[in-house]
Structure formats: structure tokens, C-alpha cells
Image (cartoon, rainbow, N blue to C red):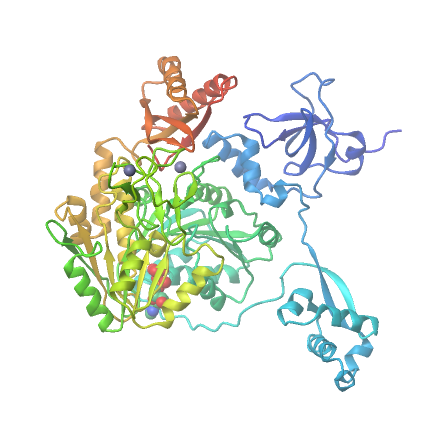
């Protein structure tokens, strides 16, 4: 007689994290089929070549495309329940097709690192302390001679529902004391699973402000639409109270027991943002970002997946976080480039989130003071609901922007006279100045006065940046670092000098110039340590007058109430960029930085230092603002058949040999172009602007079309061609759909 099989299918189709765009067939071992019901989304161990791999079951199957005798059985089952839910399975499958990326890699990308490595998808367990009956009534005085035990027992007595080991260490209680009390029969221990459910944080401390009319209209609109799919663009100037609007909408959805995913840019999540959420919602909030370790990320993932976490705040990769009751996705600073992954699986988290919301029939809210041209265009064409906030919330005013013409001026440390004067006045008023320079390090170039030698990276076609404080030469493209030298390697002269300025240099020079003024630098170098950013912002809030110098990190989401003057040192950076998105990015950065001024009651002022004060873009931005600028920019894009009016895919190839990458793309173009539809437009192959990076020579081919279907068809043909042709060669290729970088 046959025993009933829990899994009646003889085969599984499996996705593996390998660069092949295919699924792999395995047999279901009989013993396993008897005991387990296999489901798509579960992880299994499979033999692969001579080794073994972790794979994801994509489908159960009656048949195999291969000779059944040749199909190997898989080794073991890793999960009791799918780690890729049905919903995420659909999303990943769509993403693999849309981005022409190997499905196995997409699945693995969607999982936290520890699950990719085979860790169990379970909460870790933790010790909890409880009093025994005797321990509950034990008078503390009897322990006066053992103060640590006394403290320990007292703390546990005060927690009738138990004290976690984590909480005990936070209280500074000695673990040895706990053990002794256990031996005495006063305490007992229990293993409990680590899920912070129930350990509610806050008490609603913050009283929400009364919404202004613009905020009320936006909130009502969003509430009306909260149960269906739709994309809304909350387009509000910096400080207009966008966050306040989405806090209101979230509040209602939390009452309806929904989960909410709030996406923030890579470095935009400030301690301030988190505090604000925590002070408003009496519910479990989890974070998911790159500063957390792998275990913390898995814990957050589990809390979201179990439905415990009601609010999930995360960066790009949280687009894939499982959340069974997801009711809303918010994408803050939706224009931010960190939502696009620039290597490997090149997805855009915003676009993925929109697809996900559509599958789930829930709304998406995009928020920005400087919406991307893509989103603006969708809003103009009424594909997105366009909600505008044009007033600053409370009493704050929009800062004025003024151009400072640098032509013919004598500059002191890169500052014009009028900028220095404005800075002094601001400090005299006991207010803060923010200086924006999007270049970290001391100087971008080190040069020899005698022979003209320039310190360049050995692996890239770029100069090395001088970092004086760290005493290093650093390549910002491949991360190569060398000791700073003081003798020219070509002519042995000791007359080496730096050209150009970075944030570190401005900081050093202003220290000399303004001895007693606190000067704080905020860039990737000064904020490497985990808590550095929090400490810096703390310092900024402690001082009245101060100077903040920073890169684009400063442009993101921070609220410095005492900043009233912003100086953009080099407004021309990006003005003549080879990339057609250069202007858009510059305008976004300038507007965002400018928005740091005058966020509270004091009015703000912005100075843009430029050698091109009459450049149409700068003039438009200063006089008419971002929206005008963007609308002009969009009509230019339309005329030039550029995104978002045309869709684009870029194929990249790189080889250690100087010509190979270029030759490969040329050969592909020759082979395939005759087969493409006449709606396809090709440019290239062309060399990347920085041709050599980390030792690889890079070539690109751009494909455009007014319609997605022919573009995808052509891309699929190219992917197939490249997979076949690169099998023998050591050339790497990448497909970039909707690329943000095109050089
Ligand atoms: P944004 O997200 O658009 O930058 P925020 O929501 O952070 O703006 O609001 C900016 C500041 O104004 C915050 O300090 C916030 O508490 C305050 N604020 C927001 N809405 C109001 C309002 N209706 N009345 C008074 N203050 C407000
Ligand atoms: Zn020299
Ligand atoms: Zn380099």
C-alpha cells in the first residue's frame, strides 16, 4: 500500500544565485515528499556541479524538460514556510523580466543576507528572567551584602511580566548575579523568541500641529484614496509639511491594522526622522538600512514578515520586505538616486514599489520638494495624482536665492567677498551658515610644480584625491588608497601642491580665519562611524552660531532650525555634464540645500557662487523656482527624444583588454540591428567618460524607443546574444533598464 505523499509532484523548478537566466530541475526525494508539503518560495539545498547550493523553489512540476534519469534529487529542505511569499514571487518574477536580470539573483537579492547564507528564518531566542514564588516575596534587605544580586532581584521583582536579558544588560545588571539568584531558587530563566512585539515604545508625546489648508486638502485626497491602487505625488517645497501629511495618513491606516512601508534615501534616515515617527505612533516600528548588521536586518525582516511591525522604515532593499498586511508604500525624497541600484541587479526601488502596490491594490505616495522629471511628467499627464504644497508650514518662509558673479573677483579660500561678508553678518546674529561643496577630501588633485606630474589612480583614468587629515591619496572610484607623498616620483622635487578645494580644505581654512566659531564638517569621511552623524547633529543643535560644511549628505532631510544662510560654493558643478540628467541633478541638489535655510521662524538666504550667472538654467531656477525649471527641462527632453518621453536601455561591457569590450558591443550591433524593429534607435558603442575603472575598460551601447514592447524585445535578443558570446571570453556585461547614468 502507498503512503499518501504530502508533495505529489516529482520535480521542482529551482532558481539559483548564478548568472544564468534559467531555472534548474531537481527531483523531490521520496522521503521528503512523504513528510513535507513543498511550496514555491521555500529554500532547498541542491547539488550543483561539484558543490552544493541554496536554491529557491519556483514551481512544482509533473514533468521535467530533461531526461528524468539525469535529473538529480535535491539534498534537503531549509524552510517550513516560504521565505519568498506568493506576492514577492510575483514581484521578483516581474522584476527579472523587466530588468532582464537572472531570476535566481533577483530572489537572493530580495532576501536578507543571512537567509541567503542558509540561516533559519526564525526569531532567535533570548533569555528572560522571572522571579520564583520565593523570589517574589524575598525581602531585599537580606541581600545587602551582595549588592549586585540585590539590584538584579529588585529589577526582576519590578517586572512581573519578565525581564529580557537584553533589557537586563541595558540596565547594567551583572549576568553572574542572575545566575547566583537562580541557584538560590529566587529567579528562574525561560527561553523566549526574540520578537519585540508587545514592548511598545512610546507614549504619544508630540501634539500634532493643526494642518494648514494645503496640507488638509492633500491629506483628505490621500485618505479618500487609501484603499485602492494609485500613485500620488506630494510635491511640496522643503519645509512645507509633507512629512506631517503622511503621518496623518499613516495614523489612519495603522488604526485599520495595516502595515506601512516608508522608504528613505540611503543616507537620508536621520535619528530625527525616527524620533518623529516614534513620538507619534504607539506601535512597533522597525528599521532596515545599511548601518545595521546582518542579524539586526534579519530580525527586522522577521518582524515585518510576521506582521508585528506596523511601520517599516527602510532604504532601497526594503522594497522587497515581506509584510502580510501592507496597506501603503511611501517613498520619501523620491527623486533620490540611491533608490536605483547601480550594479548587479539594477532595479529602481520606486518603480518596483509602484508595481508592488499595483499587484496589491494599495496606494503609493511619492514625496519630494524636487520631484524627478519622470514623476513630474507622470503627474502632468495625470497618471499620478499631483498634490502641491507651495507654502512653508508654520511661520517659515521660502528662502531667497541670489547669484554671486565670480567673474573677475578675487576669491579668499574659494569665497567671494560678498559671501564672506554675509557669513560674518550671519555669525554676528548668532545664527548658522551652511556651506555646500559636493567634493569631499582636501583637494581633487596633487601636482608637481617642477615637472607637472599629477597623482593618478593606477587602476582608473582619474586623479587621486588628497586627504590631508588621513594623510592619504584616495581614488573615489575604485577605493584605492595610498600614503600621501611629499616628493615627486618623477623628478624628486619637493614642490608638490594641491589644485582645487574639497570640504576638508574649506574646514581647515575657515578654522584659521574664524578662530572661535564652531565648524562642523558633514561628509562621508566625517560620518563613517556608526554614531558620528547623530553626534554631529547633536553638536549643531547645541550651538547658536556655527558653520556647517558638507557634501550632498547635508541636502538630505535634515532640519537645522538655526541655519539662515546657505552658500553654494560651486553652482556650476554639473552645469556642463555629459549626462543629460546633469542639469536635473544640479537643480535638485541646489534646491534641496537651499531648503535647509530658514526652516524655522528666522528668514533664510541663499547665495549661489557662479561663473555663469546668465546661464538659462541657473537664472530660471533662481527667479522662477524648481517647478518652472523642470517644466522647461521636460520640453527639452521631449524635443531631443530623451527619457521620460523615450525609454532607454544601456548595455555595458567591460574587459581588462583595451579593445575587447568595444569590439564585443560593435559585433552585437552588427549582428542584431538588422533584426530590430524600426522603432529602435541605437547609439554607440561609445567609451565611458572614465574609460578605465578598477582596471576594467568600459564601453556602452544605448538603445531607445518610444515604446516599451519593442525595447524589451530588442533587449531580450541582446541579452541572449551576449550570454552566448561571453561564455568563452572574460568579458562582463550588464543590462541597465531605465538607466540613471548614461556614460
Ligand atoms: P517637509 O517634510 O515638507 O520638509 P515637515 O513635515 O518636516 O516638512 O515640516 C517642517 C516643519 O514644520 C516641522 O518642524 C514640522 O513639525 C512643522 N510643521 C508641519 N506642519 C505644520 C503645521 N501645519 N503647522 C505648524 N508647523 C508645522
Ligand atoms: Zn615632478
Ligand atoms: Zn581608482
Q: Position of residue 476 (x, y in %)?
A: 38, 42
Quarter location, residue 714: top left
Q: Residue at x 77, y 66 (%)?
A: 189
Picture layout, residue 16 above or below residue 541: above
Q: Please give left or right for residue 203 compared with residue 331 in the image.
A: right
Q: Which residue lies furthest to the right in this view?
A: 1
Picture layout, residue 58 above or below residue 181: above
Q: Please give left or right for residue 185 compared with residue 312 in the image.
A: right
Residue 609 seen by the camera? yes
Residue 597 seen by the camera? no
- In front: 375, or 502? 502
- In front: 624, or 540? 540
Q: Where is residue 28 in the image (x, y as percent from the top left)?
A: 74, 29
Q: Please give left or right for residue 289 compared with residue 560 in the image.
A: right
- In front: 80, or 556? 556
Q: Which residue lies furthest to the left in this view?
A: 408
Q: Where is residue 68 in the image (x, y as percent from the top left)?
A: 72, 18
Quarter of the rendering occupied by the N terminus: top right
Amino acid at each position: 500500500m502507498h503512503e499518501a505523499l504530502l508533495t505529489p509532484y516529482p520535480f521542482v523548478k529551482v532558481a539559483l544565485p548564478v548568472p544564468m537566466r534559467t531555472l534548474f530541475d531537481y527531483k523531490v526525494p521520496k522521503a521528503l515528499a512523504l513528510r513535507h508539503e513543498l511550496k514555491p518560495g521555500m529554500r532547498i539545498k541542491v547539488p550543483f556541479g561539484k558543490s552544493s547550493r541554496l536554491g529557491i523553489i519556483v514551481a512544482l512540476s509533473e514533468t521535467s524538460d530533461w531526461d528524468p534519469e539525469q535529473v538529480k534529487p535535491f539534498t534537503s529542505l531549509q524552510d517550513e514556510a516560504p521565505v519568498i511569499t506568493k506576492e514577492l514571487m510575483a514581484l521578483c518574477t516581474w522584476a527579472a523580466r523587466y530588468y532582464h536580470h537572472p531570476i535566481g539573483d533577483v530572489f537572493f537579492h530580495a532576501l536578507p543576507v543571512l537567509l541567503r547564507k542558509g540561516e533559519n528564518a526564525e526569531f532567535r531566542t533570548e533569555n528572560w528572567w522571572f522571579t520564583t514564588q520565593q523570589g517574589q516575596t524575598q525581602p531585599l534587605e537580606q541581600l545587602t551584602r551582595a549588592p549586585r544580586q540585590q539590584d538584579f532581584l529588585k529589577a526582576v521583582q519590578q517586572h512581573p511580566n519578565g525581564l529580557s536579558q537584553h533589557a537586563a544588560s541595558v540596565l547594567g545588571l551583572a549576568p553572574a548575579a542572575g545566575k547566583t539568584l537562580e541557584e538560590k531558587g529566587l529567579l528562574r530563566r525561560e527561553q523566549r523568541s526574540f520578537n519585540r512585539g508587545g514592548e511598545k515604545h512610546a507614549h504619544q508625546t508630540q501634539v500634532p500641529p493643526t494642518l494648514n489648508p494645503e496640507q488638509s486638502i492633500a491629506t483628505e485626497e490621500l485618505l479618500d484614496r487609501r484603499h485602492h491602487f494609485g500613485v500620488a505625488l506630494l510635491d511640496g517645497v522643503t519645509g512645507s509639511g509633507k512629512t506631517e501629511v503622511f503621518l496623518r495618513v499613516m495614523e489612519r491606516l495603522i488604526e485599520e491594522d495595516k502595515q506601512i512601508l516608508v522608504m528613505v534615501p540611503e543616507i537620508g534616515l536621520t535619528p530625527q526622522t525616527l524620533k518623529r515617527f516614534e513620538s507619534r505612533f504607539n506601535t512597533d516600528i522597525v528599521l532596515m538600512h545599511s548601518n545595521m548588521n546582518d542579524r539586526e536586518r534579519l530580525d527586522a525582516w522577521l518582524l515585518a514578515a510576521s506582521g508585528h511591525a506596523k511601520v517599516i522604515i527602510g532604504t532601497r532593499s526594503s522594497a522587497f520586505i515581506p509584510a502580510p498586511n501592507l496597506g501603503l508604500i511611501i517613498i520619501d525624497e523620491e527623486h533620490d538616486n540611491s533608490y536605483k541600484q547601480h550594479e548587479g541587479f539594477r532595479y529602481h526601488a520606486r518603480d518596483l514599489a509602484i508595481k508592488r502596490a499595483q499587484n496589491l491594490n494599495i496606494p503609493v505616495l511619492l514625496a519630494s520638494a524636487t520631484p524627478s522629471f519622470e514623476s513630474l511628467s507622470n503627474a502632468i499627464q495625470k497618471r499620478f495624482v499631483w498634490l502641491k504644497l507651495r507654502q512653508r508650514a508654520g511661520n517659515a518662509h521660502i528662502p531667497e536665492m541670489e547669484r554671486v558673479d565670480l567673474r573677475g573677483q578675487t576669491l579668499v579660500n574659494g569665497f567671494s567677498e560678498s559671501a564672506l561678508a554675509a557669513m560674518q553678518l550671519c555669525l554676528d546674529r548668532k545664527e548658522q551658515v551652511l556651506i555646500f561643496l559636493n567634493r569631499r577630501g582636501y583637494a581633487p588633485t596633487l601636482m608637481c610644480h617642477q615637472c607637472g606630474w599629477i597623482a593618478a589612480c593606477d587602476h582608473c583614468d582619474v586623479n587621486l584625491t588628497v586627504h590631508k587629515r588621513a594623510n592619504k591619496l584616495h581614488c573615489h572610484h575604485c577605493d584605492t588608497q595610498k600614503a600621501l607623498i611629499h616628493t615627486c616620483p618623477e623628478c624628486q622635487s619637493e614642490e608638490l601642491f594641491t589644485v582645487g578645494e574639497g570640504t576638508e580644505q574649506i574646514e581647515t581654512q575657515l578654522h584659521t580665519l574664524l578662530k572661535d566659531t564652531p565648524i562642523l564638517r558633514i561628509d562621508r569621511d566625517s560620518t563613517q562611524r556608526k554614531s558620528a552623524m547623530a553626534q554631529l547633529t547633536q553638536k549643531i543643535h547645541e550651538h547658536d552660531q556655527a558653520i556647517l560644511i558638507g557634501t550632498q549628505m547635508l541636502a538630505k532631510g535634515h532640519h537645522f532650525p538655526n541655519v539662515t544662510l546657505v552658500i553654494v560654493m560651486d553652482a556650476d558643478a554639473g552645469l556642463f555634464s555629459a549626462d543629460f540628467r546633469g542639469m536635473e541633478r544640479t537643480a535638485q541638489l541646489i534646491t534641496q540645500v537651499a531648503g535647509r535655510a530658514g526652516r524655522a521662524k528666522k528668514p533664510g538666504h541663499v547665495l549661489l557662487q557662479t561663473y555663469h550667472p546668465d546661464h538659462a538654467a541657473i537664472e530660471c531656477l533662481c527667479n522662477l523656482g524648481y517647478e518652472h525649471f523642470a517644466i522647461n527641462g521636460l520640453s527639452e527632453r521631449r524635443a531631443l527624444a530623451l527619457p521620460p518621453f523615450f525609454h532607454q536601455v544601456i548595455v555595458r561591457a567591460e574587459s581588462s583588454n583595451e579593445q575587447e569590450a568595444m569590439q564585443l558591443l560593435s559585433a552585437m550591433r552588427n549582428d542584431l540591428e538588422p533584426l530590430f524593429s524600426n522603432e529602435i534607435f541605437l547609439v554607440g558603442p561609445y567609451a565611458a567618460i572614465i574609460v578605465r575603472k578598477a582596471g576594467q575598460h568600459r564601453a556602452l551601447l544605448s538603445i531607445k524607443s518610444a515604446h516599451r514592447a519593442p525595447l524589451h524585445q530588442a533587449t531580450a535578443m541582446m541579452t541572449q546574444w551576449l550570454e552566448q558570446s561571453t561564455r568563452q571570453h572574460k568579458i562582463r556585461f550588464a543590462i541597465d533598464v531605465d538607466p540613471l547614468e548614461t556614460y
